[in-house]
Image (cartoon, rainbow, N blue to C red):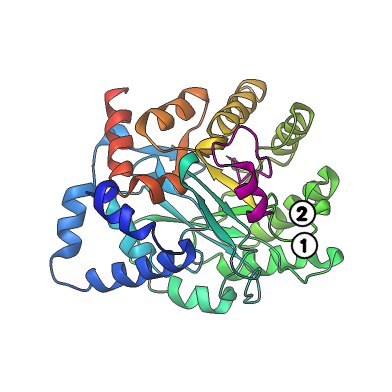
Amino acid sequence: MYKSIIRSILFKFDPESVHYFTFSFLNLIFKIPLVKQIIRKLYCIKSPKLERNLFGLKFSNPVGLAAGFDKDAVLYNQLSNFGFGFIEIGTVTPLAQEGNPKKRLFRLANDQALINRMGFNNSGLESIISRLKKNKKKVIIGGNIGKNTLTSPDKYTDDYAACFKALHPYVDYFVLNVSCPNVGSHAKLNDKDYLKSLINHIKKLNSTFQKEKPILLKIGPDLNNGQLDEIINLVNQTKIGGVIACNTSITRKSLKTPESVVNRIGSGGLSGQPIKSRSTEVIRYLSQNGNKTFPIIGVGGIHSAKDAIEKIKAGADLVQIYTGFVYEGPSLVKRINKAILKNH
């Protein structure tokens, strides 16, 4: 029903407008009595065989919603009813920001892909925390954090630290987003010495809290093997919780969408099916060359249960969906969990 009717209607309109319309609609229907219970019965699967224990957290199942979908922590309680084992909010920056000028989100329907150059649009720490205080603790929440666009390079660490300290009581794990291609100059965030300094600073802050929270690093799919080796060394040296692989890509290889259309769209991060294989390659490389010494959350091009199983077999301990959720609908979560149980 989703793909044949709902998606065909939604895809006639601007993607960003549809996103906000969908949020308003879901917020409305979940206020209707019994809707929550009906949705949970339709989409949630519970089984001890789906549970995962990673970096000190117990996940009810290994399928999560990637950052960027519920940036402002508006709908995480409602979205949890679709069967997710965890939901990542953000990217959160200290100050609210509009992000890049619109139009900034584009569908490549022939490729089952999206291109976005949102630019970390979010309502800022204070606003997001006010909504996280309403957390009903039904699902694990990850906090994906970054820097404000106008922050000067010498203040990057201050932005990450501000987000970390303020969000610490309200999220279950943290993700340092250093790989988004849509936030202007971020060369410093790709420097291994700076990354080590940033991670160690955040770890030091973490140790000041009574209960420390896991810290993960989100990397892009466009890194070469030498850079991936550096990531492996960095994770093992700093002993952070793990890696999320991968973010969106700046490449435009082998797309079915006409080159003229892609050129008109311009810059932005590519997500969805075109980055599926590369994401899986990165996961496999990290897992094999890292000797499985750290957990990996696999994301990128998961549009089917088969895609998710491929990521898991390549070395992912958990998986996340975003573009696949847009193209396939909420039943994708259940299909993945059923396939995981079948392959158990």
Residue indicated by mark 1: 157
Residue 277 lies, with reference to residue 148, above or below; the image says above
- Please name the amino acid that badge 2 sits on: Leu
- Looking at the picture, how far across and down is residue 272, in whole percent? 51, 42
Residue 232, percent from left and from top:
71, 32
Disc 2 designates what residue?
198
User: Pointers 1 and 2 in contact (CB under 8 A)?
Assistant: yes
Q: Considering only vertical position in the picture, is 7 above or below 278?
A: below
Assign the magenta stretch its main secondary structure.
loop
Which of the 4 quarters of the picture holds residue 62?
A: top left
Q: Residue at x 39, y 60 (%)?
A: 12
Query: Horizontal placement of 111 versus 245: left or right?
Result: left
Q: Quadrant of residue 49?
A: top left
- How far is mark 1 from mark 2, CA to CA? 6 Å
Stretch in magenta = 244-267
The C terminus: image quadrant? top left
